[in-house]
Image: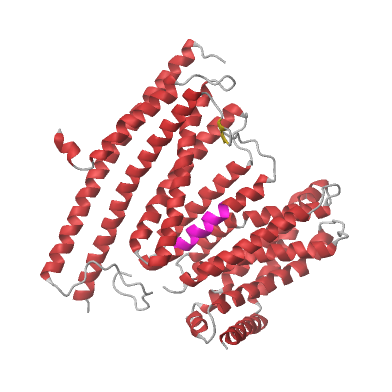
């Protein structure tokens, strides 16, 4: 089954459309990549700041692995 | 200009790879003798299917890792990989229905692979739902890890159960090597590489965001408990 | 000594659940009522004695059982939650496996009882001829119930401990039970429909599913209780 000239043209358009879509996505992902790096940096700064201010404060631990049965303010 | 490449320079490798893959799929490969231009759907279909297998394997392995070590870093890997895997599964099914319409004349049949893929998609959508509706991170991690492992075991069983019905899905990679024109095979491999690269870049982004989320939650928690009543 | 304690724990939990069920009857009534409603609805929806019902009969039967089982699943751990009695069960002397196995055995008994009580009603109301090999039918019903209950118990534990757990339980359980559904329906169809070959292939498939999903929850259930 050979393609007609018109079908070939459609295919070229499709190629361009997909390339365009990919470029948009690529740019968006690059932005997100930069933002995530920035955010990682900011969180690290925040953590360092708090642990420097109060050495007793454990900011690297996530919340404790127990089911809280007394509801706090956030829960 | 150098500023763009300073961090995450590897990311720019994705650009030429993907453009090459797109060019090969749309322009460079010959038409299929029987299927014509609709053959070109197949390259990204195959690449996305590879990423799905990769992503859910990463999820299952990371879930097992979490249950064994109780380290939330594993859970982050599992969650990120499951999210992206679900998106790629949607992509596989979408391209598959389009291709099926062109090749078989129907949008959907209850073929083993199609059905197993659909079940996989539903299960991991459920996985994301489970993650969404939980508040305690450790509990959420344990539950979703259990679910991921059960789902990962369920899909091959599904496949076997449905395979006793007649299968019409084409088998591309057999024991005798790849069953198609060498140029098509090249395009397929390049598409696979490009989509795997996309998966990796996306993983990096998601993992960083999830880690940042965790870090902020930890700081917030620590500060709260200190100033609490 | 440890084994003896585990077996005793298993029996006690089973007895406790049975006594509770005998007093409240909520699971029994809900499941039976649901199954009967399904028969009525199908009879009304498809117009009673017709060839269409005959072809769809195994599917109707199993769909009713799976949804009834889903209703039963919610109460397995549901009544342990309001007063946190599950913690007591886990901490009681004996292995924790006993809790999981007893809960599973309990819901298996209920599933089988509901099936035993409602299968004749199904055959009578939808005017299907009773199969000659009813022993084989009983085997398929039991194996299907076992497959359903194994996965169901594991996930009802998750569902009971989560906000909006009911919703998630249903969403997760249906796709996981698809192999049971396929094999059980095909085995039943082989028995009921003339000229369809031996049901043993499907029965073996059902057995395989039961074996796999017996082993997997036994490896995993422990992790659900640690947090």
Taking depth in this image into account, of B164 and B92 the one nearest to the observer is B164
Residue at screen point 49% across, 35% down? B46
Q: Where C110 sits versus B186, above or below?
A: below
Position of the C terminus of chain C, as image quadrant, is bottom left
The prevailing secondary structure element of the residues shown in magenta is: helix
Residue B145 sits inside the magenta stretch: yes
Residue at screen point 15% across, 35% down? B2
Residue at screen point 60% across, 75% down? C101
Task: Say which quarter of the image contains residue C213.
Answer: bottom right
Q: x and y percent of residue C15 in the render?
A: 64, 84
Q: Where C132 sits versus A24, above or below?
A: below
Furthest residue in direction top, as rendered: A5
Q: Where B162 sits versus C9, above or below?
A: above
Magenta span covers which residues? B144-155
Q: x and y percent of residue B105 in the render?
A: 62, 28
Position of the N terminus of chain C, as image quadrant, is bottom right
Q: x and y percent of residue C118 in the render?
A: 76, 66
Taking depth in this image into account, of C193 and B41 the one nearest to the observer is B41
Q: x and y percent of residue B85 in the render?
A: 44, 47
Residue C164 sits inside the magenta stretch: no
Q: Where B36 sits versus B155, above or below?
A: above
């Amino acid at each position: 089954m050979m393609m007609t000239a018109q079908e070939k043209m459609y295919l070229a358009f499709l190629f361009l459309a997909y390339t365009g879509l990919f470029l948009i996505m690529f740019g968006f992902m690059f932005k997100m990549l930069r933002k995530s790096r920035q955010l990682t940096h900011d969180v690290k700064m925040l953590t360092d700041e708090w642990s420097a201010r109060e050495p007793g404060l454990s900011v690297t631990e996530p919340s404790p692995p127990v089911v809280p049965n007394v509801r706090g303010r956030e829960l | 200009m150098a500023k763009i490449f300073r961090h995450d320079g590897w990311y720019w490798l994705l650009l030429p790879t993907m453009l090459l893959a797109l060019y090969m799929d749309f322009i460079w490969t010959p038409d299929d003798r029987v299927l014509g231009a609709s053959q070109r759907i197949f390259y990204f279909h195959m690449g996305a299917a590879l990423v799905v297998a990769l992503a859910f394997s990463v999820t299952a392995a990371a879930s097992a890792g979490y249950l064994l070590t109780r380290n939330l870093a594993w859970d982050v890997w599992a969650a990120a990989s499951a999210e992206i895997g679900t998106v790629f599964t949607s992509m596989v099914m979408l391209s598959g229905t389009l291709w099926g319409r062109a090749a078989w004349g129907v949008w959907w049949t209850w073929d083993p692979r199609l059905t197993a893929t659909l079940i996989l998609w539903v299960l991991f959508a459920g996985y994301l739902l489970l993650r969404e509706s939980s508040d305690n991170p450790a509990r959420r991690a344990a539950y979703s890890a259990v679910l991921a492992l059960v789902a990962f075991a369920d899909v091959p069983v599904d496949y076997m159960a449905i395979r006793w019905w007649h299968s019409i899905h084409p088998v591309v990679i057999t024991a005798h090597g790849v069953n198609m024109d060498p140029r098509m095979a090249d395009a397929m491999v390049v598409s696979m590489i490009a989509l795997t690269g996309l998966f990796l870049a996306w993983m990096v982004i998601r993992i960083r965001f999830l880690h940042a989320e965790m870090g902020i939650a930890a700081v917030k928690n620590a500060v709260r408990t200190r100033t609490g009543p | 000594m440890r084994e003896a304690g585990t077996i005793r724990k298993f029996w006690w939990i089973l007895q406790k659940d049975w006594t509770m069920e005998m007093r409240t009857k909520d699971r029994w009534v809900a499941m039976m009522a649901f199954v009967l409603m399904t028969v009525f609805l199908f009879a009304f929806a498809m117009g009673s004695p017709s060839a269409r019902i005959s072809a769809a009969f195994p599917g109707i039967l199993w769909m009713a059982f799976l949804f009834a089982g889903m209703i039963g699943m919610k109460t397995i751990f549901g009544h342990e939650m309001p007063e946190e009695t599950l913690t007591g069960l886990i901490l009681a002397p004996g292995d924790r496996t006993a809790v999981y196995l007893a809960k599973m055995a309990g819901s298996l008994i209920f599933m089988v009882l509901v099936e035993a009580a409602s299968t004749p009603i199904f055959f009578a109301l939808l005017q299907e001829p009773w199969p000659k090999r009813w022993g084989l039918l009983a085997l398929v019903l039991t194996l299907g119930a076992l497959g359903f209950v194994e996965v169901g118990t594991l996930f009802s534990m998750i569902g009971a401990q989560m906000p909006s757990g009911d919703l998630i339980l249903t969403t997760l359980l249906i796709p996981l039970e698809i192999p049971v559904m396929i094999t059980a329906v095909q085995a039943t169809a082989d028995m009921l429909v003339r000229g369809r070959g031996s049901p043993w292939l499907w029965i073996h498939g059902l057995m395989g599913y039961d074996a796999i999903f017996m082993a997997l929850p036994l490896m995993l259930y422990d992790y659900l209780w640690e947090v």
